[in-house]
């Protein structure tokens, strides 16, 4: 507890000095900086090698803080009350007098916002007088980081500080919902769309693969382990790592488990770290058995589909 406090102080110190640092969230680690400072935000884009036309998510402690920068609406309030803090990102209208750096939004009039649940991140946000812009803590197009060692693997000594919050509980990024007009899901993520529908008591649109791409999370080749990946595989090919989600009687050296009992939540949690491990173990190809396409399974399949475009 004591160490946590002093680590939060350390993190705050770096952020106050316009540095960017890595922070734990319940989904994946973020590369965070003061969202009101262009000097700070610029460092995120540089470190991540992220194109400037790909806007960032801004993380707030609560709705009061958010209202300094965005207009809220009825759909937002319903979803906020049900799912925040948690793995849901909202696209809202930016206020004209907001102090959010133009770099965060790529000069657009909308802002992606989220209320992260990880207790260390929440304590950090509470201690600051600005919100934090934070994309996933990985080099663009690569796998997101879900633990301290992943962040170090991505950025090495170029990252000033990593607030260590252990392994991320959910393991895949937040669900993104556009609330500017009719609620539209832009990215599958940690919150099941069926639950969003139930909360809003209406059908919602999905736009995760349209030609007109709003969220570059929709772009192909994303979340890539850096080796070719094959989905819905029945058996491994020669020299291929084979990923399973339930226990098999006969096991081979090249078998890896996301889960041993077809548990989708556990599979999501292990997904990125297992793919990293397989690459490190020296495999040049990976195949994954079929994963049920419901609940968070949809999110897993979405990420695998994009990763398979290698
Ligand atoms: O779980 C998460 O959401 C993690 C943690 C760190 O919070 N963050 C994350 O950020 O995944 P990032 O930058 O890797 O993905 C954010 C996605 C991008 O695809 C971006 O294009 C989209 O959100 N986005 C940001 N602002 C947007 C906006 N105003 N309209 C539409 N999409 C937006
Ligand atoms: Mg990302």
Image (tube, grey):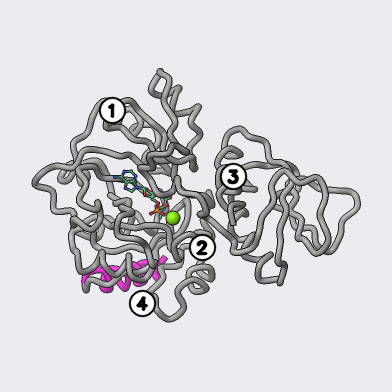
Residue 143 within the segment the image draws in magenta = no
Tell which quarter ligand 2 is in.
Answer: bottom left
- How far from the left and from the top, in percent, is residue 200? 38, 22
Q: Report which residue position mark 4 lands on.
A: 160
Q: Does the image show residue 117? A: yes
* Category of crowding for the residue at label 4, using alpha-carbon neighbours closer than 10 angstroms: few (below 14), some (14–19), many (at least 20): few
* Category of crowding for the residue at label 3, using alpha-carbon neighbours closer than 10 angstroms: few (below 14), some (14–19), many (at least 20): many
Q: Is residue 188 left or right of residue 85?
A: right
- How far from the left and from the top, in percent, is residue 26? 46, 51
Q: Which of disc 3 and disc 4 is earlier in sequence?
A: 4
* Closer to the eye: label 4 or 3: 3
Q: Alpha-carbon distance for marks 2 and 1?
A: 37 Å
Q: Report which residue position mark 3 lands on.
A: 300
Q: Report which residue position mark 1 lands on.
A: 181
Q: Does the image show residue 274? A: no
Q: Report which residue position mark 2 lands on.
A: 166
Pick the residue in front: 11 or 272: 272
Q: Which residues are magenta?
A: 1-16
Which image quadrant for residue 3? bottom left
Q: Which of disc 1 and disc 2 is earlier in sequence?
A: 2
Label 4: which secondary element:
loop
Q: Which of disc 1 and disc 4 is earlier in sequence?
A: 4
Disc 4, disc 3: CB below 8 Å?
Answer: no
Residue at (44, 37) in percent of width and height: 210
Q: Alpha-carbon distance for marks 4 and 3?
A: 31 Å
Q: Alpha-carbon distance for marks 1 and 3?
A: 27 Å
Residue at (45, 66) in percent of width and height: 139
* Closer to the eye: label 2 or 1: 1
Which image quadrant for residue 265? top right
Q: Which of disc 3 and disc 2 is earlier in sequence?
A: 2
Which image quadrant for residue 122? bottom left
């Amino acid at each position: 507890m004591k160490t946590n406090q002093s680590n939060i102080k350390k993190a705050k110190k770096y952020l106050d000095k316009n540095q960017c640092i890595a922070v734990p969230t319940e989904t994946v680690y973020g590369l965070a900086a003061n969202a009101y400072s262009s000097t700070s935000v610029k460092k995120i884009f540089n470190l991540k090698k992220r194109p400037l036309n790909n806007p960032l998510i801004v993380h707030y402690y609560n709705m009061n803080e958010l209202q300094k920068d965005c207009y809220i609406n009825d759909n937002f309030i319903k979803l906020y009350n049900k799912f925040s803090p948690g793995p849901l990102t909202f696209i809202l209208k930016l206020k004209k007098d907001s102090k959010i750096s133009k770099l965060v939004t790529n000069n657009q009039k909308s802002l992606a916002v989220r209320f992260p649940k990880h207790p260390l991140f929440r304590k950090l946000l509470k201690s600051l007088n600005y919100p934090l812009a934070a994309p996933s803590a990985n080099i663009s197009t690569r796998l997101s980081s879900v633990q301290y060692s992943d962040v170090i693997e991505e950025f090495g000594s170029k990252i000033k500080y990593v607030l260590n919050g252990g392994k991320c509980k959910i393991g895949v990024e937040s669900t993104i919902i556009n609330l500017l007009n009719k609620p539209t899901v832009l990215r599958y993520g940690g919150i099941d769309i069926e639950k969003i529908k139930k909360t809003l008591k209406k059908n919602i649109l999905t736009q995760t693969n349209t030609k007109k791409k709003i969220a570059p999370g929709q772009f192909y080749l994303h979340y890539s382990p850096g080796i070719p990946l094959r989905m819905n595989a029945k058996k491994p090919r020669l020299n291929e790592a084979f990923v399973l989600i339930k226990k098999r009687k006969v096991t081979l050296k090249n078998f890896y488990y996301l889960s041993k009992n077809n548990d989708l939540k556990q599979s999501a949690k292990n997904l990125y770290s297992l793919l990293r491990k397989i690459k490190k173990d020296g495999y040049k190809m990976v195949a994954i058995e079929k994963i049920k396409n419901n609940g968070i399974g949809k999110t897993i399949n979405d990420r695998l589909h994009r990763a398979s475009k290698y």
